[in-house]
Amino acid sequence: MLEPFERDELLIRIDEGQKFIVDELKEMKEHSAYQNGSIARAIDLATKNYSLINSNRTWINAIKWVGGILGTLILACLGWLIVEVIRGTL
């Protein structure tokens, strides 16, 4: 199992690799030999999918942060409620 910092660094390296590949594909598409045909369409599809994956990752991270904050608040409220019930002051 990877430590959290190792996992984050691995994800950063994967993301940099994906960006490099997308840039290379875009450059290849601009080359005159690939202007027509299925290769250009395949490159378009690959770069569009990368953009969708990247935007989805941003939403997933935002949802994780919001969920973490809400979860922490709920646990804090439950903890307070339990303490008050034990004290008998509620």
Image: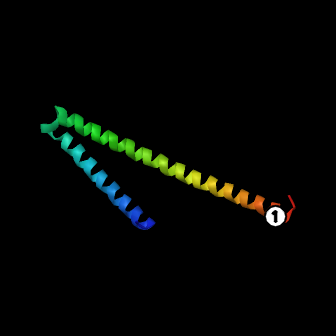
Q: Residue at x 16, y 41 (%)?
A: 31
Q: How many marks?
A: 1
Q: Name the residue furthest left.
A: 33
> From the viewer's perspective, is 77 left or right of 10?
right
- In which quadrant will I find the N terminus? bottom left
Residue 46: x and y in percent read 28, 41
Q: Residue at x 43, y 44 (%)?
A: 56
Tag 1 secondary structure: helix
> From the viewer's perspective, is 10 left or right of 89?
left
Residue 87: x and y in percent read 84, 65
Q: Which residue is mark 1?
A: 86
86 or 43: which is nearer to us?
86
Colouring used for the render: rainbow
Q: Name the residue furthest right.
A: 89
> From the viewer's perspective, is 18 left or right of 90?
left
1 or 10: which is nearer to us?
1
Graded by Cα atoms within 10 Å as few (under 14), some (14 to 19) or many (20 or more), the crowding at tag 1 reads few
60 or 51: which is nearer to us?
60
- Against 14, residue 5 (above or below) is below
Residue 39 image-quadrant placement:
top left
Q: Amino acid at mark 1?
A: Ile
Q: Residue at x 33, y 44 (%)?
A: 50
- In which quadrant will I find the C terminus? bottom right
Residue 71: x and y in percent read 62, 54
